[in-house]
Amino acid sequence: MADKSFIEKPESFPQKEEWGVEWGLIFPDANGEYQSPINLNSREARYDPSLLEVRLSPNYVVCRDCEVINDGHSIQIVLKSKSVLVGGPLPRGHEFELHDVQFHWGRENQRGSEHTVNFKAFPMEIGKEHLGLKAVTEILQDIQYKGKSKTIPCFNPNSLLPDPLLRDYWVYEGSLTIPPCSESVTWILFRYPLTVSQLQIEEFRRLRTHVKGAELLEGCDGILGDNFRPTQPLSDRVIRAAFQ
């Protein structure tokens, strides 16, 4: 989870066969030393008790009439109600607003997450059905193609939080994982993943990167997936842990 509220998103992505491989040719920030995502080595994370001095506190509000969009690169939920996050590693006295939710997934269960933990990737962790995402997965068939969108009556961002106490997390300084890859982003990675069912993740794998009826390039099947940036070097950054 990262604050992206202060970053203006580009209108388009460079079209590459592999997600994020050559972004640095167009977006200079993508060549920086503090890029995301990273592989998180849990044994090298440094316990920092100061992270728990001020509790990480979300004030996420149930959003009515949220728009779910297939932009050809990901699925995005645009929130209309004001939801904010404070505390933890975030600067004191500042609220960080949740503007939207984006999803990254793999074509196979062995990959999909942007960050890896001890070199393990997650597909959208497979397990039980995620009730909070049910309203989203149920309408994905209606926005199968790029440019399609649909309004859902209700979405609760709190359903994406793994633990109401929010005490077990890692934090590091990094960047956006999409262009322009701007740095100065605080990443908060929760220790315990959420779970979705195999049926739910298959709904994501039916989505397409192109407009309905568009002619595909040779060698392109048009399936939306593997939309995650490869992990980047940690460089001299320190990963902090709020737990021992």
Image (cartoon, rainbow, N blue to C red):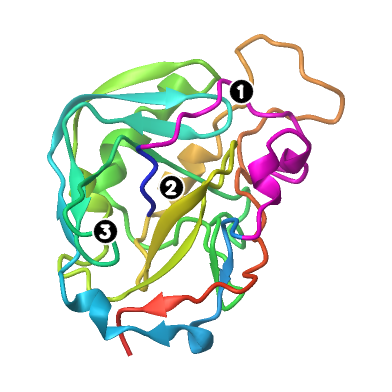
Q: To which quarter of the image does residue 187 belong?
A: bottom left
Closer to the eye: label 2 or 3: 3
Q: Determine contact: label 3, label 1, CB under 8 Å.
A: no
Find residue 153 and name its label. Answer: none
Type of amino acid at the residue the image marks with label 3: Pro
Find residue 199 and name its label. Answer: 2
Counting other residues with Cα less than 10 Å from the Cα at mark 1, is it few (<14), some (14-19), or many (20 or more)?
Answer: few
Please provide the residue range marked out in magenta. 6-33
Residue at (46%, 16%) from the top-left corner?
A: 148
Q: Is residue 212 above or below residue 86?
A: above
Cα–Cα gap, marks 3 and 1:
31 Å
Earlier-in-chain disc, 1 versus 2: 1
Q: Nearer the viewer, residue 144 or 154?
A: 154
Q: Nearer the viewer, residue 238 or 163?
A: 238
- Left or right of 160? Residue 13 is right
Q: Nearer the viewer, residue 200 or 52?
A: 52
Residue extending furthest right? 218
Find residue 12 and name its label. Answer: 1
Give percent across and percent down for residue 150: 34, 18
Cα–Cα gap, marks 1 and 2:
30 Å
Earlier-in-chain disc, 2 versus 3: 3
Type of amino acid at the residue the image marks with label 2: Leu
Question: Which residue is tagged 3?
Answer: 91
Closer to the eye: label 1 or 2: 1
Residue at (45%, 21%) from the top-left corner?
A: 143
Counting other residues with Cα less than 10 Å from the Cα at mark 2, is it few (<14), some (14-19), or many (20 or more)?
Answer: some
Residue at (41%, 77%) from the top-left corner?
A: 240
